Image: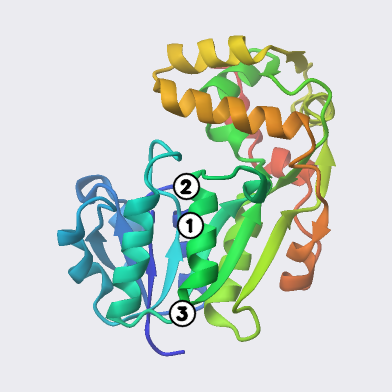
């Protein structure tokens, strides 16, 4: 495996962590970013950085020259209307010489028919290109990076429209390491992994946060309508808010309740538990 690995979304959460994992493995990488002027290039010494706009094929040639493997993350924004752009990018990559695509998907995608993620999965399965699909559970990091959730925890409350549903969660660092393994080691092509081994309700998450932070974090179940109102007030567009409503409904119905030990199997170690995540990110929730 001597060709270049193209990491899309390198300036965002999952892509950035995968890039860091690959650099630790001394892989040949190229970082594709949404906004070249805002890319943290100082953190990636020696890495070629290119601008990639999923909706603008004119940005593809510079990104894909010499690329053998592709880390594909969803583009920013609406997850429900960009499948043509994403499948077009995959098709271009295949023509340019890409042999293997590792796609960051989501748990429950097989139940959200016609979502962009479902369409991309189906395209990959039928494309003839080698793939590894990573269906990730609820990212623990949502609690640290989502402004609504982060600020709520700072104030002592976790508000989600999930009732008492138990959700399969995973640390983004584990997802990224599995992706890096799939991109650099043999034995992972044409496989689908389910990443989420820690089944916790939001109330249990709040209790663990309380122990780690040394102060009470209360879980307040809210309605889908209240969640949508909060998202819209935070600037999330209507279509994306509708997407999250579907995801939350699926979570309550058990779509995110699988606990498959694929992280442990691939990495040969236990996956990061929620308590360890909370300890590592405790500084994020300190009251200002």
Sequence-first tag of 3 and 1: 3
The residues bearing labels 2 and 1 have C-alpha atoms spaced at a distance of 6 Å
166 left or right, relative to 235: right
Verify CB contact (< 8 Å) between mark 2 and mark 1. Answer: yes
Q: Position of residue 194 (x, y in %)?
A: 71, 58
Judging from the image, what secondary structure is the residue with disc 1 in? helix
Q: What residue sits 29% from the left and 50% below the top?
A: 39
Q: Residue visible at 25% across and 52% down?
A: 53
Task: Name the mark on residue 110.
Answer: none
Left or right: residue 151 versus residue 57 is right
Q: Secondary structure at mark 2?
A: helix
Comparing labels 2 and 3, the label whose residue is closer to the camera: 2
Q: Residue 227, located in which quarter of the rendered image? A: top right
Residue identifier under label 2: 116
Q: Residue at x 45, y 40 (%)?
A: 79
Residue 120 numbered tag: 1
């Amino acid at each position: 495996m001597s060709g270049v690995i193209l990491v899309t979304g390198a300036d965002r959460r999952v892509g950035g962590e995968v890039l860091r994992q690959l650099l630790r493995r001394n892989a040949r990488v190229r970082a594709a970013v949404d906004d070249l002027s805002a890319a943290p290039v100082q953190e990636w010494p020696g890495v070629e950085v290119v601008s990639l706009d999923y909706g603008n094929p004119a940005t593809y040639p510079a990104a894909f020259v010499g690329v053998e493997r592709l880390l594909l993350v969803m583009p920013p924004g609406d997850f429900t209307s960009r499948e043509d752009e994403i499948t077009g990018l995959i098709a271009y990559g295949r023509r340019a010489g890409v042999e293997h695509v590792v796609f960051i998907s989501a748990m429950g995608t097989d139940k959200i028919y016609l979502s962009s993620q479902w369409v991309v999965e189906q395209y990959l399965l039928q494309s003839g290109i080698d793939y590894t699909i990573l269906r990730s559970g609820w990212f623990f990091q949502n609690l640290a990076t989502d402004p609504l959730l982060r600020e709520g925890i700072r104030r002592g409350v976790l508000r989600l429209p999930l009732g008492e549903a138990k959700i399969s969660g995973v640390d983004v660092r584990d997802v990224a390491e599995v992706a890096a393994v799939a991109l650099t080691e043999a034995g992972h092509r044409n496989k689908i992994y389910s990443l989420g081994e820690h089944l916790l309700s939001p109330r249990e998450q709040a209790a663990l946060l309380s122990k780690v932070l040394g102060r009470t974090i209360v879980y307040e179940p809210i309605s889908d309508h209240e969640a949508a109102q909060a998202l819209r007030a935070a600037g999330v567009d209507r279509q994306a808010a509708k997407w999250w409503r579907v995801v939350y409904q699926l979570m309550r119905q058990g779509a995110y309740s699988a606990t498959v030990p694929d992280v442990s199997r691939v990495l040969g170690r236990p996956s990061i538990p929620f308590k360890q995540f909370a300890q590592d990110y405790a500084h994020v929730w300190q009251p200002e």
